Image (tube, rainbow, N blue to C red):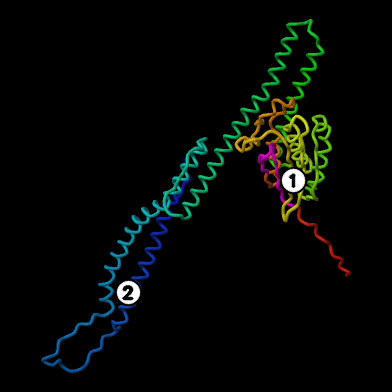
Amino acid sequence: MDRQPGLSARSKLTLSYLGFLMLAGALLLAVVWVFLLRYVPEVIATTPGRPGPGDVPIYIPDRFELWRAFAPKATAMLGFLLLFGLVGGWVLAGSMLAPLTRITNATRLAANGSLAHRIQLEGREDEFRELADAFDTMLARLEAHDAEQRRFAANAAHELRTPLAITQTLLEVARNDLDRDTGELVDRLHFVNTRAIDLIEALLLLSRANQRSFAREHVDLSLAAEEATETLLPLAEKRGLTVETSGDIAPTVGSHALLLQLTTNLVHNAIVHNLPDQGTVWVTTSADPGTVVLTVENTGEKLTPQLVATLTEPFQRGSARTRTGHPGVGLGLAIARSITEAHDGTLTLTPRPDGGLRAVVRLPAAPPPTRLTDPTT
């Protein structure tokens, strides 16, 4: 990578260490010089008289002579500090910037598409270690997200190719067999085309939920649950199921259309994955401090925790979906999870001990309305 003209970070750190060391050395020499001046008089006074036979002559240098002796040593010391500061600062700066070099190399690998690389910085828990660990965590999430997007794209392409292939086959059969009843052909084409449209609309809804591109308003989750239940009640009665709704007011903030779609998907999933006859669906809402809860339960076959953990993945179908006569597009629970996450909530799926599924949605509760006080009171 070509850098702009100028000093590198290592050079700047080296010069910073050098400048600090030179300043400290100069201050230390200045203190030594001032300390020496305290013991050297500016003018040397002599006493009259001749020295006695036992006296030893004492030589006291003046300040100029002291400076001539002190200056070369101080200059040599500053030169040594200059050389030591350059070498030591360069080595120390390189040691300090080594973790950043590893992080930079990992960033370049990630930019080139290699998300499997990890820094795994050794050493004690310092700021560089925290930065490297945070970067490794980000790479792990990006790798998982990239793998999920690849699977989603492959599954979506497969799902979209199926109705197109069926349509092409039906058209070729009709072209080769001109005496074939066109009414049956039109009905089958209509069914296949409807399925393709449903899949495309589900993909668009999933993309909208993931992008969080919607206006937020106050929504009562209990009213959305009642509306979804009433809409799907004919389907439940057709399958001989009983739908029970109960609960309290559950105010939250979000998109009414998306939250209604969330509730509809959960109730629809509970209906189509139920017992063949005499099954039950329970839809309840509740409000906890700071949280509203929507719970949708249904009877059905016993599910394993491993299977339930995969149901929110796109195009993952439960074991009974292919035998219910209502195949769907495999995006119902995936859309429900995306809508829940777009509203800063959580969707939890757990198997019921007696068979069936329990879906629990927790969303942030709407803040209480502010009361306007009358200034005349």
3 left or right of 149 in image? left
Q: Which residues are magenta?
A: 347-365
* Cα–Cα span, label 2 and label 1: 79 Å
> Could you tell me which quadrant the C terminus lies in?
bottom right
Query: Is residue 210 something that shows in the picture?
Result: no
Callout 2: few (<14), some (14-19), or many (20+) C-alpha neighbours within 10 Å?
few
Is 136 positioned to the left or the right of 153 in the image?
Answer: left
Look at the image and tell me whether residue 40 can be seen: yes
Q: Which corner quadrant of the image does residue 370 belong to?
A: bottom right
- Give the secondary structure at mark 2: helix
Query: Dot 1 corresponds to which residue?
Result: 294
Residue 134: horizontal and vertical position, in percent? 52, 48
Which callout, 2 or 1, points at the residue further toward the start of the chain?
2
Q: Are marks 2 and 1 in contact (CB under 8 Å)?
A: no
Which residue occupies the foreground of this view, 208 or 329?
329
Q: Residue at x 74, y 25 (%)?
A: 325
Dot 1 alpha-carbon crowd within 10 angstroms: few under 14, some 14 to 19, many 20 or more: many
The one nearer the camera, 36 or 113, is 113
Q: Nearer the viewer, residue 78 or 127?
A: 127
Decide whether residue 76 is among the magenta residues.
no
Q: Nearer the viewer, residue 308 or 108?
A: 308
Q: Position of residue 322 (x, y in %)?
A: 69, 26
Which residue matches tag 2?
32
| Residue that protrudes farthest toward the left in the picture | 53
- Note whether 29 is above or below 137 in the view shown: below
- Residue at 64 percent across and 25 percent down: it is 157
Label 2 is placed on what type of residue? Val
As drawn, the label of residue 330 is none
Asked whether residue 349 is drawn in magenta, I would say: yes
Q: Quadrant of residue 56?
A: bottom left
**What kind of element bears circle 1?**
strand
Name the residue type under label 1: Leu
